[in-house]
Every structure is written in C-alpha cells, then in structure tokens.
Image (spheres, coloured by chain):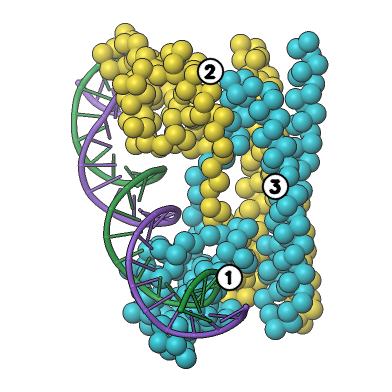
Chain colours: A yellow, B cyan, C purple, D green
Amino acid sequence: MARSSQTEMAVLGALSVEPMTGYALREAIRDVLGHFWSESFGQIYPTLNDLEARGLVVRTGGARARSSTFAVTPDGARRLRELLSEPIQAVPPRNGLMLRLFFGRMLGVDACRELIAATRADAERRLREMDRLAAEVAGEPQYSDDAPFWRLTISAGRHTAEAAIAWADESLAALDDMDRSSR
Amino acid sequence: MARSSQTEMAVLGALSVEPMTGYALREAIRDVLGHFWSESFGQIYPTLNDLEARGLVVRTGGARARSSTFAVTPDGARRLRELLSEPIQAVPPRNGLMLRLFFGRMLGVDACRELIAATRADAERRLREMDRLAAEVAGEPQYSDDAPFWRLTISAGRHTAEAAIAWADESLAALDDMDRSSR
DNA sequence: CCCAGCATGTAACGTGTTACATGATTAC
DNA sequence: GTAATCATGTAACACGTTACATGCTGGG
C-alpha cells in the first residue's frame, strides 16, 4: 500500500505534468509546490516503487543504470483523478507563533515584538518568491494548460503573505500602545 | 520525557492562565486555542503525568477521587518561559486545497469551483468564530492581563480569513474567465 | 583523478491520532 | 436507575522525518 494517499496524489500529480526521475520529483516538489506542499525523500522512493508495482506509473530505464524516468499510465491518470476528488483531509492546526503570542504575558512584550517582526520579514520574502514563481510560469509556454490553475495557488500565496504583513504592522502598533499605556 | 516540547508548552501555558483538570484542559485547547493549535487526548494525559513527575505542575486532588486540578509550579513557570523563548519550529506545509487546485487540469474546473466555494464558506465561518472569541475575551475582565495578547491571535485569525475570502472571490472570477475564453 | 551533484534506497526514531477501556458524578 | 457527561488513561497504528548507506557521472 502507498505510504499515504496524500503522497500518492502529489507524486502522481507531479508526474502527470511531466515524466521525471525520483530525484527531479523531489526538487520539483520542493521548488514548485514548496509554498504549500512538502514530501521527504523517505516518502518519495517507496511511493514510486509502490505505484510501479500497482501499474500506475512506468519506469523507463534511462541511459544510466540507476537513472530512470517515471511516467503516469492511463490507470495512474484515473487513480489521480479519483484521489483529487476525495475530500480534503484537514490537518490539525499547529501555529507556533500564535501559541507564543497567546502566552505573551509570560514571554514578554519585547520577545513578541521580535517574533512578529521576523514573521513580517518572512512574509515579504514569500511575496518575492511568489513573484519569482509567477515569472517562471509566464516564461514557459509549454505549460499553458496548467498555468491558469498554478496562478490560483500563486495568488493564494500572495494573499496570505499580504495578510500576514498587514497583521504584523497592526500588531506591532498594538504592542507599542501596550507599552505606552503601562507607563 | 515529555511527548514533545510543543505539547509541553501548550499544556504549561494553558495551566499558567488558570489551573484546571486534564479534561478541562482539552476543552480549553479545543475551544480557545482551536483556531491555531490542537492537542489530542493521547498527548495531554501522558504529558500531565510527566510534568508532574518533573515537579513542573502539581496535582491537587479534588472532591472526587479521580478528579484533580493541575497547577503550574514556580519551576514550571520557569520552564514555560524557557520553552516560549525557543525558536519556532516550522511545520512542513501540506495544503490539500492548493495541491488539488495545482492539478486542476486533471480535476476539472467545476470541481475546483466547488472547492473554492467551500473554502470561502469556511472562512466566513471562521470570521464569525473570531467575533465570538473577541466577545468572550471582552466579557471576562479577570483575564485583562492576557487579553491584549489574545487579541493579537484573534486579529491574525481575522486577517487570514479575510484574505481567504478575497482570494476565493478573485479565483472564482478567474475560473469564470477560463470558461469564457475556452468557448 | 577527484569532487560535486545526480540518483536510489532503507532503517530507526519520534510524534501524534484513534480506538479502546474504565469508572465517577450529576441531571432527569 | 439510567443516560449523559466528566474524567483518566493505554495500546496500536499511521505517518513522516532524519540519518545513514551506496553508487554513478560529468566537469575541472
């Protein structure tokens, strides 16, 4: 059985865009899906072997003995559509920043300020990352059928980052007010 | 050893606001921290026993034999401050919605539309939940020292939900445009 | 020739969830 | 008395990460 249908979905999906090696798969997931998805090495290879055994992908031995390209079979495409249609399984939230801020009285106002400033900086960085991705998508016409969907995820990344920045600015101001009123 | 320093932090933090039973702790985490944190039963009780063994919390036998209230000791408060100061450990992203939209070509435009509409509805629900929490905080003056920090997390929840709604509206419009241009 | 990067895999570990099991108390 | 809820706990399982192990290939 596959490690999890989630990993199966990500792997089949990525290979459906373009056949590639397991190594390239990992890089694609990190670089392209990175802002909303992640898979580790330890998941990818067992999943590929499993998918191959079930006939959902085929391995085409490349020039080198240990360098093979994986491609999705018609069965694999069917399975992918099935997986994509399954209900989204909610991940239990675990936001370390919020947990620390919630107990901000124990942590101290200054440390809170630093955490929020770091979050703001990170959101700015993510915003630039979305720009990079958007440029990459625009510059590769061979993916024009996929591009409109990819733009949805990039837009989501942008909205999220912008919201984080607005919240951070508001929160830093609120902490300043706390300082003033406690004097 | 504690199951994880993350759970330890959440448990010590919650008990630092107010001593309570393990059962109440679980409800507090679900109802109050629920929009950014979660702990399961199987984590809470072992962690409480462990914290007790290490002298970070004390158990005060209540009226009933098997109903005891846990309170943070001075050592526990020190440990909590230490934990809160630790760097935030990033969770690998796993957004099932984004994964499905990214492979939207395989899933189909209509299914994408439904997913986005459901996300929008969920964000609306979360927005109302934030209103409820804000009212709850405003109505309980005994937590006035904590309230300013709690408001930061509520504000974050609001910003995130509002960003999701704006993104959803934009994305639904983009999908309509796709339909139009493909005709 | 050797190093960096490509490529594939496995085993151990930690963590967290789920399901199960049990019993006390309170409201009807 | 009995059902619902409060309360506490454990064991099995699933999942995912990390670290380890191995070898090929191309460029300097």
For the C terminus of chain A, the image quarter is: bottom right
Q: Residue under label 1, please give it.
A: B28
- In the picture, the disc for residue A17 is 2
User: For this rendering, which residue is in front, B46 or A183?
Assistant: B46
Coordinates of residue B158 in the picture (x, y in percent) = 74, 55
Farthest residue, direction bottom:
B63
Name the side, left or right, on which A150 lies relative to B66: right
- In the picture, the disc for residue B122 is 3
Q: Which residue is drawn at 80% across and 29% down?
A: B173
> Is disc 1 in contact with disc 2, using a CB cutoff of under 8 Å?
no
In which quarter of the view is residue A60 placed?
A: top left
Q: Which of marks 1 and 2 is in front?
A: 1
- Chain letter for mark 1: B
Q: Residue at x 69, y 41 (%)?
A: B119
Q: Up-down: is A56 above or below A118? A: above
Q: Name the kind of residue labelled 3 in the image.
A: Asp
Counting labels gives 3
Coordinates of residue A18 in the picture (x, y in percent) = 50, 16
Q: Which residue is drawn at 76% across and 57% down?
A: B128
Kindly report the distance in space between the C-alpha atoms of the residues bearing marks 3 and 1: 22 Å
Q: Name the kind of residue labelled 2 in the image.
A: Val
Secondary element under disc 1, as helix, strand or loop, is helix
Q: Nearer the viewer, mark 3 or mark 2?
A: 3
